[in-house]
Image (cartoon, rainbow, N blue to C red):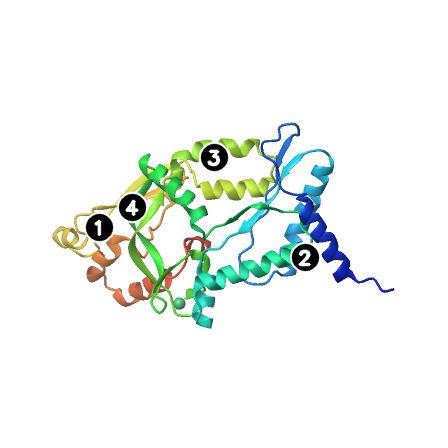
Amino acid sequence: MAYDHRDIEKKAQEKWAGLNLYSADLSDESKEHYYLLTEFPYPSGDLHIGHWYAFAVTDIYARMLRMRGKNVLFPIGFDAFGLPAENAAMKHGLDPKDWTYKNMERMRGQLASMGASFDWSKEVVTCDPSYYQWTQWLFVKLFEHGLAERREAPVKWCPKDQTVLANEQVVDGCCERCGTPVEEKRLTQWFLKITDYAERLLKGLDALPWREEIKEAQRAWIGKSEGAKIKFSLQLAGGSEQELQTASSNLQAVEVFTTRPDTVFGATYVVLAPEHVLVSSLLPAVSNKKEVEAYVSATVKKTERERSEN
Ligand SMILES: [Zn+2]
């Protein structure tokens, strides 16, 4: 008789499901608790081998911990917000919600057929009100404590899709979705003041048993740096004081931040970011206006990281 894996696996999986083997009883204090989290998949509609590449190792680990007598919380869910759902819905003429929920249903079946030992009783779906009521609650708390603020800031904008793009969605100065050259716009946006916690975040990192390069990337993201602010006063070549006054709208200096103030004596020039307010106000007074405009439109499309690369 041939080994019918479809039949045997189905029977075994149904039995496991019936035994409720993987749902963690959080009130059970008799065993040591262990929280094991894997990245939740995006509900794109089909699992691929890359998903299982990530889940298999944590699944093996979860099983080992259970066998060692730990009370293991190994949840699963779907990270279900974002542009891909919007794009797919537009492409197929579907409601983004229908598309997303249908995909999740299919992926639940796929995950179950792989025999993963996830605790489905604690599943979270980030586009569901039962989940995002908590992200909203969190936001309100941050707001109440003065940690969420609104201000104007430059953003990458696709004029065709009429949407703001994340830095990661800008590919060679063009929109990842439609290939249109990206523009920069000043929009009012929300900011969370994680800078208030920079010191604590950095301290917390030291104790973590992570690889040094991962910690270094985190430190760069936290973005704390020590240095000095230096003011370079402005002088308009060949222009009168009066002209400068008008052109620079009373801004008489450019302030820069540097981690190496000791090297200031070697400074030969200062470059303004294309979105700096002085650029547009000084433009009428510069002689090589065309070149400056070309530089501005080329640089404005670059992400901050790309700009610092050159
Ligand atoms: Zn676009």
Q: Residue 113 carries which label?
A: 2
Q: Please, which residue is most extreme toward the right here?
A: 1
Quick one: 245 or 101, which is closer to the camera?
101
Residue beneath the point at 70% across and 48% down: 16
Quadrant of the drawing holding the C terminus: bottom left
For label 3, the residue is 201
Q: Can residue 57 be seen in this view?
A: no
Earlier-in-chain disc, 1 versus 3: 3
Dot in front, 4 or 3: 4
Q: Please, which residue is most extreme toward the top here?
A: 30
- CA separation, marks 4 and 2? 46 Å
Mark 1: secondary structure:
loop
Dot in front, 1 or 2: 2
Residue beneath the point at 34% across and 40% down: 140
Quadrant of the drawing holding the N terminus: bottom right
Give the crowd class for mark 1: few <14, some 14-19, many >=20 residues within 10 Å: some
**Residue 62 in picture, x, y percent from top left:** 68, 42
The amino acid at mark 2 is: Ser
Earlier-in-chain disc, 4 versus 3: 4
